[in-house]
Each structure stands twice: as C-alpha cells, then as structure tokens.
Image: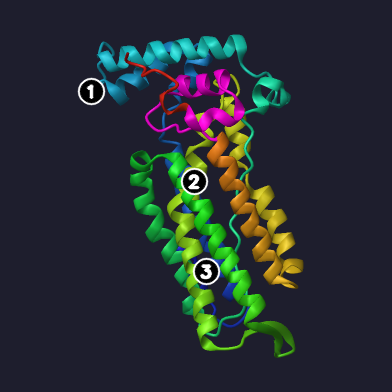
Amino acid sequence: MLIQYFITFRCSYISGPASFRIPWGLQTIPAVILSLGMSLFPESPRWLFSQGREKEALEILADLHGGGGDASNESVVLACEVITRQAHFEREAGAKSFADLLKPDCLTHTRISHQGAGLPGRRGDHVADAVPYVLNVAFTMPAIYYIDRWGRRPMLLAGTCLMGVCLMLIGGLRGGFGHWGAIDGSPVWVAENSATTKAIVVCYCLFICSFAATMGPVSWTYPAEIFPMKVRGKAVSITTVNWTFSFVLARLVPPGLADITKTCLIFGVFNFVGMVHIFFAFPETKQRTLEEVEDIFTHSRPFSRRKSENAVPDACG
C-alpha cells in the first residue's frame, strides 16, 4: 500500500489518462509474481491426507521437518500422526456446508469484525497523505513479533480503547472547534485555528498507530485460533472475506461526512462496546493448542472465558 501510494503520487504529475492507468497496470506485476511463485509451492499435507494421498504428504512433511527428507525423523512422524487424526476427525464430523456454521454449537464462535474509520478530506500537500501508510508499516512490523509475548487479549483491549479515545477526540475537536466552509465550490470542514488542525492530525496518526500495532495483526491471527476443528476451514474463510464490509463502509462514508463529528463519535462508541465484549468473552489463546482453545469454548460459560488462563491444563502435563 505504501509503495503503491508513492507510485500514484508520482503519476499524478502525468497529464492524461496515463496518470491513473499506469498505477492500475503496475498492480498486476506483484499479482503475476505471486501466481508464478505459488506454482512452486507444494500442496498442503493436510489436504493431501484428506484426499488419501498419504505418500505425497509424507514426502512434503519430510522435506519441511525431516532435515533433508528423512521420513523417519521424530518431528515428521509426530506431525504425520497429528494430521492423520485430524483428517479422520474432519471426515467424520466436519462441516458439510456453510449452513453448519449456524448450528448452536458454532454460534458461540461468531465474531464481529472491527473496521477502521478514516478521516477523508482535502490536503494541499499530497506528501503528507503518505504519513498514515508509513505509520501503518512502522507499527505493524514490531506487533508481528510481540503478539506472542503480549498476548491477544491485551492487544485487542488496548487497541479498541486507544482507537475509541482517538475517535472521540477527533469528533469532539471537529464539533467544537470548526465549521463547514467551501473551497472551489466544494464543501470542506475548516478548523478555527492551527492548534485544532494539529491536534486532529495527531489524533488521526495515533489512531493509525493504535490499529496497526494491535487490531491489525491480531484480527488475522485470532479467528484462526478460536473456531472448532470441524468448521475451522470454512469459518476462517468467511472471516477473511472482509471486502464486503469494506464496500459497505465505503458506501457509508459519503453520507457520514455530512456530519463527521457524529460519525467519529459513533465509531468511537463501537470501539468501546467492542472492548467490553472482548474483556468478558474473549479468552487468551497465546501458547495454547487449538484443542485447548476449543475446550475453553466448549466447557466454559460465554462471559467467564476471560478467567480461562488457568482453566485448561497444560498440554504436556
């Protein structure tokens, strides 16, 4: 996203339709590279086992864990046993259709995805628009490392709290220290003084940093850890199809700009409601096996899962 932004910025100096055709065309390059690279990837051992192609799966596991293709390696044998048991279990109890996700024993795993709220508007200096992209990259990279040290719950709680505070501050500043004006005949929000403008920009940047360091990476990790094995594949596929919600959000932004103060406050409230939900209903999954996490959801009450840190014995003892 950051690289594409700078490409788009540079192409904005080109006159004619090439100014937008070039950035769009250049996006096909990484797609082609990814497609060619995927042809070199082996099939998933789990999928091969589910299709009865055990020999091919064992060869791939040996290449990955056997230190040179040794199929008798202890890690290879253990991985093979685990995958075999899971494949057998999924054949016996796996979800046959997406309708199975709506059964009572699966509804407890449903999660509402959180969407970031931006502040669209005009800026005279286009280079300043790159700041959110730079911050997003800068704060996402360390979060990928610390997610297994801090835990999922603390990051989700901190993220929703900080994002909610930032949105509330932005809404309050816009509502109390500015008004709507017009530039070149187009409506635009005008701050009453430079201090207000700077404060809004700072809050906006803090919002981006809060999202990138917490909700951004955890929102991809947590769904893959909480669903039961029999529906995990289908359920995770649904959680990653977020473009539908992005489309809805994009459609809601234009009317939301008519009263951006209330829009920011509403999204801020959503974050605080999400924080309360996370505190009471989201168990910690750090350093837990998928089986332990499933046991938490199966044998605990919905609003007691925050106390599950010691509810499940360690897998080794």
The residue where tag 2 is placed is: 156
Q: Give above or below for 109 relative to 291.
A: below
Earlier sequence position, callout 3 versus callout 1: 1
Residue drawn at the location 34% of the way across and 52% of the way down: 142
Q: Is residue 90 above or below residue 160?
A: above
Q: Amino acid at mark 1?
A: Gly
Q: Residues within 10 Å of mark 1 (few under 14, many from 20)?
A: few
Residue at the disc numbered 1? 68
- In three-dimensional space, the C-alpha distance between marks 3 and 1, rounded to whole angstroms, equals 50 Å
Residue 33 visible within the image: yes
Point out residue 168 in the picture as x, y percentages from the top left corner. 60, 65
Q: Check the image and name the residue furthest to the left.
A: 67
Label ID, residue 204: 3
- Asked whether the residues under the numbered discs 1 and 2 touch, taking CB atoms below 8 Å apart as contact, a structural biologist would say no
Observer-nearest residue: 100 or 76?
A: 100
Dot 3: what SS? helix
- Image quarter where the C terminus lies is top left
- Residue 200 at x, y = what percent? 54, 75
Q: Work out whether 64 lies above or below 147.
A: above
Does the segment drawn in magenta span residue 155? Answer: no
Badge nearest the viewer, 1 or 2: 2
Which residue sits at x=68%, y=82%?
A: 188
Q: Nearer the viewer, residue 190 or 265?
A: 265
Residue drawn at x 60%, y 49% as measured from the top left: 114
- Residue 13 visible in the picture: no
Residue 9 screen position, x and y as percent: 50, 75
